[in-house]
């Protein structure tokens, strides 16, 4: 039975073995460099912004995402085509072990590093096994057997970086991301339900606390039959001050009035959440990191599909310039019959 595996081509002007070693060493170096650099970008660019809740500007996220895609493509490519097992496994393991040194050392980090190393070694094994046993060549069939494990290990590494940046306060904030809270609050205040209850017109996202209090005061007075136009600035300021004192008394929130209303709501809810957590608040960073891991794992699914497509195009391109070559092998198959 014949099969046509692909191999890195060797020059006819140099000894085959020497050429293969040079090519495989260069590929292994590219695997390690791409992986380490991609995770470094996540550590210094993406994660600080995510932990701070700052999602403005796509450029700071573009490079880490593109770097991770490139690293995954080179990982799968190297696992397939590096013939020397020591080089293939070594490059894969180093590529995920080194990034852990970008975080603070702890028992948990060391255990996660060990788990990632085992997972990556298994991913390399699965890709190489599928590559050697496949009759013909299918990029998706071979690569997907280990590429999903690579992205899982990558999500673990990035989640470790995320946990490393979280204080207890930041961890609580991460459980309730401020951008998501601001969007939800703005949607609620401008919903028909809220407007029917409060009588407020459309509310700006950046409205200040005093402006919101003024709007609520005027709405309440108009419900009592007092037109807003008849309220003097002095009376409005007096009523606003009374409302502010009542809020401070009920909710223990001190404010000047020029703060954004959304910031005050968010701060009050975060403090309440901290009180409700009680002794469990020490586990907030772990809970936040675990939540982040599952969210990131979901978001890497499109990146996984993009990596498969990029790997397919890379192999096609290298075949067209004879860097990769097709080899026809004959294999024996054992059958048991009557």
Image (cartoon, grey):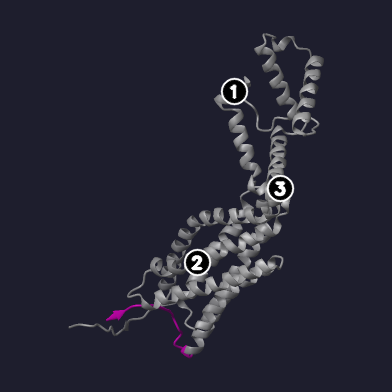
Residue 5 painted magenta? yes
Question: Which residue matches tag 1?
Answer: 195
Q: For the magenta stretch, what is the residue range?
A: 1-16
* Residue 116, position as x, y percentages in the image: 57, 69
Residue in front for this viewpoint, 330 or 121: 121
Placement of the C terminus among the 4 image quadrants? bottom left
Which mark identifies residue 278?
3
Question: Which residue matches tag 2?
Answer: 149
**What secondary structure is marked by label 2?**
helix
The residues bearing labels 3 and 1 have C-alpha atoms spaced at a distance of: 35 Å
State if disc 1 and disc 3 touch (CB < 8 Å): no
The residues bearing labels 2 and 1 have C-alpha atoms spaced at a distance of: 49 Å
The residues bearing labels 3 and 2 have C-alpha atoms spaced at a distance of: 37 Å
Chief SS of the magenta region: loop
Question: Which residue does the image show at 46% across and 88% down from the upper left?
Answer: 16
Q: Is residue 53 at least partly visible in the picture?
A: no
Quarter of the image for residue 309 reads: bottom left
Q: Is residue 269 at least partly visible in the picture?
A: yes
**What secondary structure is marked by label 3?**
helix
Q: Nearer the viewer, mark 3 or mark 1?
A: 3
* Residue 32, position as x, y percentages in the image: 59, 73
**Total of numbered circles in the picture?**
3
**Dot 2, how many residues are within 10 Å of its Cα: few (below 14), some (14-19), or many (20+)?**
some
3 or 1: tag closer to the N-terminus? 1
Which mark identifies residue 133?
none
Question: Which residue does the image show at 73% across and 49% down from the upper left?
Answer: 169
3 or 2: tag closer to the N-terminus? 2
**What secondary structure is marked by label 1?**
helix
* Residue 71, position as x, y percentages in the image: 55, 67
């Amino acid at each position: 039975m014949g099969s046509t595996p692909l191999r890195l081509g060797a020059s006819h002007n140099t000894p085959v073995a020497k050429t293969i070693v040079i090519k495989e060493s260069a590929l292994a170096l590219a695997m390690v460099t791409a992986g380490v650099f991609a995770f470094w970008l996540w550590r210094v660019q993406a994660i600080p912004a995510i932990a701070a809740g700052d999602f403005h500007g796509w450029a700071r996220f573009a490079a880490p995402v593109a770097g991770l895609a490139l690293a995954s493509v080179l990982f799968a490519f190297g696992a397939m085509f590096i013939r020397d097992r020591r080089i293939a496994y070594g490059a894969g393991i180093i590529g995920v072990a080194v990034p852990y040194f970008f975080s603070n050392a702890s028992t948990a980090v060391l255990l996660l590093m060990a788990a990632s190393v085992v997972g990556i070694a298994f991913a390399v094994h699965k890709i190489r096994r599928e590559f050697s046993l496949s009759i013909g060549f299918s990029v998706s069939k071979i690569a997907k057997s280990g590429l999903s494990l690579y992205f899982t290990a990558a999500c673990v590494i990035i989640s470790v970086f995320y946990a490393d940046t979280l204080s207890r306060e930041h961890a609580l904030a991460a459980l309730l991301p401020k951008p998501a809270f601001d969007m939800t609050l703005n949607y609620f205040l401008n919903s028909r339900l809220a407007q029917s209850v409060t009588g407020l017109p459309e509310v700006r996202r950046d409205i200040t606390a005093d402006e919101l209090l003024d709007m609520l005061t005027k709405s309440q007075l108009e419900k009592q039959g007092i037109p807003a136009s008849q309220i003097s600035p002095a009376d409005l300021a007096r009523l606003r001050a009374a409302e502010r004192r009542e809020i401070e008394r009920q909710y223990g929130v001190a404010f000047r009035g020029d703060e954004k209303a959304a910031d005050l709501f968010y701060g009050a809810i975060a403090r309440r959440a901290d009180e409700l957590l009680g002794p469990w608040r020490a586990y907030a960073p772990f809970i936040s990191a675990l939540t982040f891991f599952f969210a990131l794992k979901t978001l890497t699914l499109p990146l996984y599909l993009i990596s498969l497509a990029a790997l397919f195009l890379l192999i096609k391109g290298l075949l067209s310039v004879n860097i990769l070559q097709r080899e026809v092998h004959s294999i024996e198959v054992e059958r048991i019959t009557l």
